[in-house]
Image: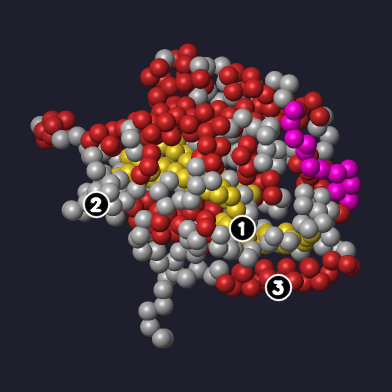
């Protein structure tokens, strides 16, 4: 009898929705704070935006945001994989500070994210698509995710293998739609898979993320008029496996691609263990690289199309002039440079250098800067732009003044499990746990093809970068927990 009563009560009073939050009273109106749309790609590098100087790409919608806003052409990651950089993006803290130094680690619940700050200021917050604050493997993707400050979460960290929000949506469209979109599990895929998406364009993962983001924006504006919103559109594209729809691949048929940056003898200048890790990758033929890169670029174009859908929806809702758009990525992709692909802790710009575009109120129009900035600078920039206080422990800098010509950072600091990297305008330096060092003089070798760490003539530069890395390591120590007494 007691069980029957319990079931009846459970039916009458269903569970609260995931990440339920009761906002403070006297919420600000949209006239006080702008809306914010944060868009992230995965494996998207800085020159995968045509307006950043690569006419081989077809990216009209990101190009529009560049024309109408500010593009940072020397923005960099601070970690060497997805999770560390996504955590740094949302916390404004280095990987060693928030603790996510690699994939496979869960974001600590006591880390204060951009979402927490905006939610507490009165924003209605949404997460659509990839977040990657929790490991993928050995997890039931139907189970609720930790909220991390979001009111709504439609999560899908992979483009089809799991029964997550995207997988369940596909099942709702029918078994054939679900199977056409399915991809192999991580770890079971070919290293260089590329093929044409079997389903219709509107059933890709990128299309689903855009649709969910648009739905969130429209519903929020309709049901909570006057309330600012923050939404993160977490795209998986152009991350492999490369399965663009044919419509995105067609523009690259016969299109001239930019050269891959590599040299026949570059491995001769690398330390033994580092070179050995690249040796097996050099035999791939040019025809394979050509097909692979065309499919990759098609993934970028399909991503761009869906970014355009989001911008158009905001514009049609009459909210374009009071919405800040930010477009960036967790990291890039070597994509044939050095005859390798993907990302790793190798300190090459292809994986470490990312797009960063701001567009909206308070952002200058049509500006481009080559000042050095980091992914963890996004959070303090947005907090500064809307006039809120910076969080304790934040290690980023506001880029509001950099947008108008002020200097950026003097160096970029990146961290992996087994290495540390310092990247200045002049040089890239990396040191590994086994003692191997890499040094590239970017003035003479902008494509990082000749390691000069052992060259006698480069010794002064090597000594300088060693010292600067040591000082940067000290400078970036975690300021938390705060000191509250003299002793």
The residue closer to the viewer here, 238 or 146, is 238
Q: Is residue 197 left or right of residue 450?
A: left
> Residue, x 13% and y 32% (percent of image)?
12
In the rendered image, residue 70, in percent from the top left (x then y), is placed at 53, 48
User: Which of the two marks, 2 or 3, is nearer to us in this view?
Assistant: 2
Q: Quadrant of residue 186?
A: top right
Location of the N terminus (image quadrant): top left
**Of pointers 1 and 3, the one earlier in the residue sequence:** 1
What element does badge 3 sit on?
A: helix
Q: Which mark is residue 371?
A: 1
Q: Is residue 461 left or right of residue 44?
A: right
What element does badge 1 sit on?
A: loop
Residue of label 3: 467
Q: Which mark is residue 152?
A: none
Q: Which mark is residue 28?
A: 2
> Residue, x 64% and y 22% (percent of image)?
251
The residue closer to the viewer here, 164 or 24, is 24
Q: Quadrant of residue 120?
A: bottom left
Start and end of the magenta stretch? 256-268
The residue closer to the viewer here, 40 or 28, is 28
* Residues packed near mark 2 inside 10 Å, few (<14), some (14 to 19) or many (20 plus): some
């Amino acid at each position: 009898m007691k069980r029957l009563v319990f079931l009846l009560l459970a039916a009458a009073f269903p569970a609260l929705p995931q990440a339920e939050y009761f906002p403070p009273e006297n919420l600000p109106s949209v006239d006080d704070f702008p809306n914010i749309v944060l868009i992230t790609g995965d494996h998207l590098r800085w020159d995968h935006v045509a307006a950043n100087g690569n006419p081989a790409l077809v990216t009209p919608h990101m190009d529009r945001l560049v024309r109408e806003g500010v593009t940072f052409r020397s923005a960099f990651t601070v970690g060497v994989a997805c999770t560390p950089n996504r955590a740094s993006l949302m916390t404004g803290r280095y990987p060693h500070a928030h603790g996510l130094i690699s994939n496979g680690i869960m974001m600590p619940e006591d880390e204060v994210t951009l979402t927490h700050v905006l939610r507490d200021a009165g924003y209605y917050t949404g997460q659509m698509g990839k977040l990657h604050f929790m490991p993928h493997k050995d997890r039931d993707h139907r189970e609720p995710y930790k909220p991390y400050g979001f009111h709504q979460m439609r999560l899908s960290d992979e483009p089809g293998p799991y029964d997550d929000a995207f997988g369940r949506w596909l099942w709702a469209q029918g078994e054939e739609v679900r199977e056409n979109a399915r991809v192999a599990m991580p770890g079971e895929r070919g290293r260089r898979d590329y093929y044409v998406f079997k389903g219709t364009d509107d059933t890709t993962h990128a299309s689903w993320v855009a649709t969910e983001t648009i739905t969130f924006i429209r519903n929020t504006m309709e049901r909570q008029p006057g309330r600012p919103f923050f939404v993160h559109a977490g795209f998986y594209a152009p991350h492999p496996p490369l399965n663009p729809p044919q419509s995105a691949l067609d523009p690259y048929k016969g299109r001239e691609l930019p050269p891959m940056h590599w040299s026949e003898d570059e491995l001769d200048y690398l330390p033994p263990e580092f070179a050995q890790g690249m040796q097996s990758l050099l035999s791939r033929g040019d025809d394979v690289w050509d097909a692979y890169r065309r499919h990759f670029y098609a993934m970028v174009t399909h991503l761009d199309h869906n970014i355009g859908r989001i911008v158009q929806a905001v514009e049609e809702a009459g909210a374009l002039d009071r919405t800040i758009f930010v477009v960036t990525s967790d990291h890039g992709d070597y994509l044939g440079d050095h005859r390798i692909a993907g990302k790793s802790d190798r300190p090459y710009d292809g994986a470490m250098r990312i797009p960063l575009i701001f567009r909206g109120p308070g952002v200058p129009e049509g500006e481009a800067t080559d000042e050095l900035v980091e992914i963890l600078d996004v959070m303090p920039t947005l907090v500064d732009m809307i006039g809120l206080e910076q969080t304790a422990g934040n290690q980023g800098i506001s880029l509001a003044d950099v947008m108008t010509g002020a200097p950026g950072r003097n160096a970029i600091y990146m961290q992996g499990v087994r290495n540390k990297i310092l990247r200045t305008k002049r040089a890239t330096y990396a040191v590994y746990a086994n003692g191997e060092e890499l040094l590239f003089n970017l003035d003479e070798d902008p494509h990082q093809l000749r390691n000069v760490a052992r060259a006698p003539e480069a010794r002064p530069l090597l000594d300088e970068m060693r010292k600067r890395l040591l000082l940067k390591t000290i400078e970036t120590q975690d300021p938390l927990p705060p000191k509250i007494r003299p002793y």
